[in-house]
Image (tube, coloured by chain):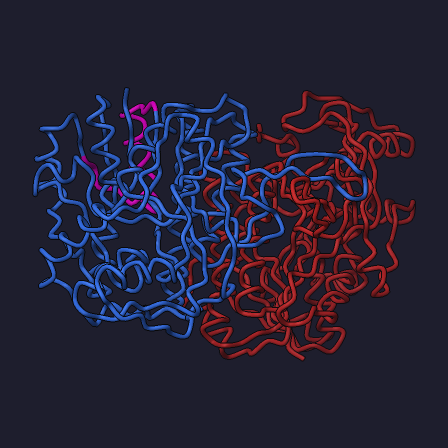
Chain colours: A red, B blue
Amino acid sequence: MRALILGGDGFCGWPTSLHFANEGYEVLIVDNLSRRSITDQLSAPSLTPIRPIERRIEAAQNIGNIRFEHCDIATDTDKFKNILAAFEADVIVHFAEQRSAPYSMLNGAARTYTVNNNVSGTNNLFSILVELQQYPHIVHLGTMGVYGYNDDFGEIPEGYLGITVRKTQKDIVIPYPANPGSIYHMTKCMDHTLMQFYAKNWGFRITDLHQGIVWGTDTDLTASDEDLINRFDYDGEYGTVLNRFISQSQIGHPLTVYGSGGQARAFIHIQDTARCVFLAAESPPEAGAPVQVFNQIAEVHTVGNLAALLHEQTGALIEFQENPRKEAAENSLKVSNQGLCSLGFKPITLADNLLSEVKSTVGKYEGRLNRDAIKSKARW
Amino acid sequence: MRALILGGDGFCGWPTSLHFANEGYEVLIVDNLSRRSITDQLSAPSLTPIRPIERRIEAAQNIGNIRFEHCDIATDTDKFKNILAAFEADVIVHFAEQRSAPYSMLNGAARTYTVNNNVSGTNNLFSILVELQQYPHIVHLGTMGVYGYNDDFGEIPEGYLGITVRKTQKDIVIPYPANPGSIYHMTKCMDHTLMQFYAKNWGFRITDLHQGIVWGTDTDLTASDEDLINRFDYDGEYGTVLNRFISQSQIGHPLTVYGSGGQARAFIHIQDTARCVFLAAESPPEAGAPVQVFNQIAEVHTVGNLAALLHEQTGALIEFQENPRKEAAENSLKVSNQGLCSLGFKPITLADNLLSEVKSTVGKYEGRLNRDAIKSKARW
């Protein structure tokens, strides 16, 4: 079986690529390495000393069959077409999008890059496959943020909502109404509409994984060799909240909580990301079916509770800052993750040993941390 | 008052620009003239001998204050920014999108162009305005095709749907679920999601006009001077169905009905397009309100009935062809247009004199018609 991993050099893409290779897939990573160059732009390189892609690939040969092609799928349509034609993937995992909400809200250039890169890349993928008449299973990384955080709908279902149309009194199921909270989340909603049409018109089998906030650094595989080490972001734009808090506590910086900390969000460990994507990849929907949606999450916490947990463990101070984002001060959140659980997913939840593992990673590379990059510069 | 008309050289954009100028607005047209070049690509130039933009603008000085700037708003972000900064529009009407469903389904290049042009152009508009901190009323041309053609929802409301969430039994109003039928329609759905976010986050006042199929050629203003004549498309990709039928009947070509002809669609005359856009432009929603949606339509007909009407009048034969599109063989359709009617819109409906007017236009320029361009090449 052949798996094409778009964006396979990134935080989630790299461990996932190794996971597929380890499971016996022939893996081809396609990436434009933009995450590495944005890192330079923001003066916040990965805390962990990730290796150049060539060295990563070389070291990965011990795990399985894995190759790399440099290509910008949003702009280099011809090269991308040649890659798709030659590889004939059975499954394509699509991580190749600008994935930070704060970055997407930084300024005009970041908005334009996020929209053009994410939407054009996704469209190119499907449009070229139509041309080639190739119909592999496409696994797209979405985000919990497409749902918005709103109590009206009850527990967040997986992509679809049962409603009664008031005027006709008909009971039907509709795609869950999109309510994005940033330019980044908006592009994932737009992707979903795009995929809905490609599935309907050309019969593509598509799975959209609405993922929670990822935390942790390494998986068993990325930890098995220093040359395979995963990237770790702690900065205000790309550092996800729990990883940021751990980094802050490690260097004696107060934990920066936006607003009251009452925002409830869904979380998942990086090891589970790789596992879930693999489970989903092996369970495509029927051809012609609507896009299959799974909520890829393990558990729900409020931002304030996470800060309190770290405060208890480390004594780190908590600094409540004015919220730079437009979001509800607090919300309740219940999320279904039945789809992946029914495929065998057993979530890793926040446990002390995992937190210590991340802390020891941060401790090891503390000297590489740029304190000026901790504060988010984005304003909603 | 200053009105910026993006795509103001096109079939709907040009009459609308003249309408605003005639109402005393200072009008600036921004257009990349792509409609003229696609025309050459398809070997189907406008049936009417439209003048070069410079001559149009010169002739339009008799009507009002109207200028032109050549700019591709999807790709030339810097120039577009300078134009927006200098003009300081009170209202911006956004026609600058690839607007043909069949063209968008032709091939990979057409899919890519449609998505990149439409989505990037719309995002650039809003993103640059955020940078400039300018918040004019934005009037975006949508399409009835975003709703899909589905009986479950009853009469199609204007953009929003009252529902009861089955699980929580809460009564709420949601954006009408998007169900596009082509890549073109898909981009308009994606635009809507984008505008929803820009309205929510930055308080933009936005009106989305979900327009029916436009027919007719001229408005009072475009007919007032040969140099102001409007474009007229009769080809399989850009010719709208009624205009195509009239052209076919005129040259003794059978009327090409796709499938059974049971497809019910909403229609509007080009004169009403200009009037409705103007009415909408002068009635912005409140800042911070959700996107205001009007259905810009006059009446509903089935494609088969339109063919039968022209057959009666002209004796033209009707040729039922295999439907190149994926759509229901027949559907019922009821559409609310209360919003624009409440602002004073009195729809022009299909009447013999208007049909004759179009026929006489086609008759006059019949010699310019390329018969090879009549058949649509797009396959869904």
Horizontal arrangement in the rendering, residue A100 relative to residue B292 (left or right):
right
Which quadrant would the C terminus of chain A be assigned to in this image?
top right
Q: Between residues A339 and B339, which one lies in front from this camera angle?
A: B339
Locate residue B263, reporting x and y percent.
45, 60
Locate residue A21, reporting x and y percent.
71, 73
Q: Residue at x 16, y 25 (%)?
A: B65
Verify whether residue B321 appears in magenta.
no
Horizontal arrangement in the rendering, residue B326 relative to residue A303 (left or right):
left
Verify whether residue B81 appears in magenta.
yes
Horizontal arrangement in the rendering, residue B183 relative to residue B319 (left or right):
right
Q: Can you say whether A225 is above or below B207 in the image?
A: below
Residue furthest out toward the front:
B312
Locate residue B211, reporting x and y percent.
40, 43
Q: Using the rendered view, name the quadrant where residue A267 is placed.
A: top right
Which quadrant would the N terminus of chain A be assigned to in this image?
bottom right
Magenta span of residues:
B68-90
Q: Is residue A368 visible?
A: no
Q: Is residue B15 visible?
A: yes
Q: Residue at x 8, y 35 (%)?
A: B59
